[in-house]
Amino acid sequence: MALTFHKYHGAGNDFIIIDNRDGRFNASGMDNPKTISALCNRRLGIGADGLMTLSKAVGFDFRMRYYNSDGIEGSMCGNGGRCIAAFAEKKGIAGKKSRFLAIDGPHDTEVLEDNFPDFVVKLRMNDVLWPYHEEEGYHLDTGSPHLVIFEQNISGVNLMTQGRKLRYLDKFSPKGVNVNFAQLSDYEQISMRTYERGVEEETLACGTGAVAVAVAAYARGVKSPDNSYLLKTKGGELRVRFSPPGKNGSYFTDVWLTGPAKHVFSGELP
């Protein structure tokens, strides 16, 4: 029996989504790194930055499992979370508001617009600890580990060379780090590029990276009156809003990531 898949992207960050509530993806033996990597291959497969499965979870609308394009299960994916929420709403698995379980814990979502195949979705992220300012840049965890480096001209950055070098620094081993280069003038003008581990190249957008850049911008002294930041990626725009730490606090709370999600096509796997 064929297995249906769905291709979505969030600001150019693209994913294969499989409804695995019946467990067939696992039962078929397709849940292995070699197969997942082959499905994500852009020349020989469907092509994607990652693959997600949606399965049942007691007390939640669903469970999200995310695999990088190398076939290895990854950490939290912000754009993936927004896309799978749009998919769940469209399929009637969840309503416009949903609560799902991911590798880093529960997440709340809301589909703000549903003009199929186009959606606008906001996703609540976990609290974020004040970033460490290290020699290389700002280091923080937004569900996935990130390094944020501010540059005057990110278009001139050789991301494959510089990003890969930083991603594999011994201090970030064994799992490595996602590397973001950001260019800012104010909270509504932050451009960014991301070298993503597991994909091992530049992605058109990164949701957890957008949160990391916004938090790092605040730590750098770029303050927004309503704590809202507009991140401009190659694939589109993402908005991050949060409550900064209060006096004697160390965590950014009420962190929300908002942006577009789009259904691209669906198909079947034998």
Image (cartoon, rainbow, N blue to C red):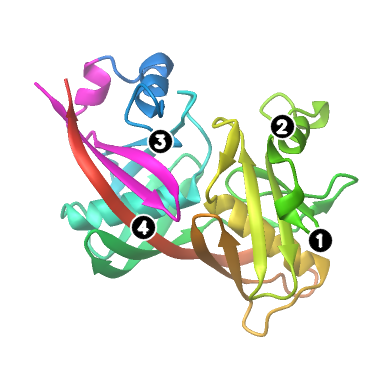
Q: Nearer the viewer, residue 214 or 261?
A: 261
* Gap between marks 1 and 3 measured at Cα: 30 Å
Query: The disc labelled 2 sits on which kind of residue?
Result: Arg
- Camera-near label (1 vs 2) is 1
| Secondary element at tag 2 | helix
Segment tinted magenta in the rendering = 1-28
The local secondary structure at tag 3 comes to loop
Name the residue tied to disc 2.
164
Residue of label 3: 48
Secondary structure under the numbered disc 4 in the rendered image: strand
Camera sees residue 42: yes
Tell me which numbered mark, 2 or 3, is placed earlier along the sequence: 3
Q: Cα distance, mark 2 to mark 4? A: 28 Å
Q: Are marks 1 and 2 in contact (CB under 8 Å)?
A: no
What is the three-letter code of the residue carrying label 4? Ala
Which numbered circle lies on residue 261? Answer: 4
The residue that label 1 is drawn on is 152
* Number of marks drawn: 4
Dot 2, crowdedness within 10 Å: few (<14), some or many (≥20)?
many
Mark 3 belongs to which amino acid? Ala
**Left or right placement of residue 157 versus residue 257 in this view:** right
Give me the C-alpha separation between circle 4 and circle 3: 14 Å
The quadrant the N terminus occupies is: top left
- Image point (49%, 45%), residue name: 77
**Mark with earlier residue (1, 2):** 1
**Residue ranking furthest to the bottom:** 225
| 193 horizontally vs 61: left or right | right
Relative placement, left or right, of 68 versus 220 is: left
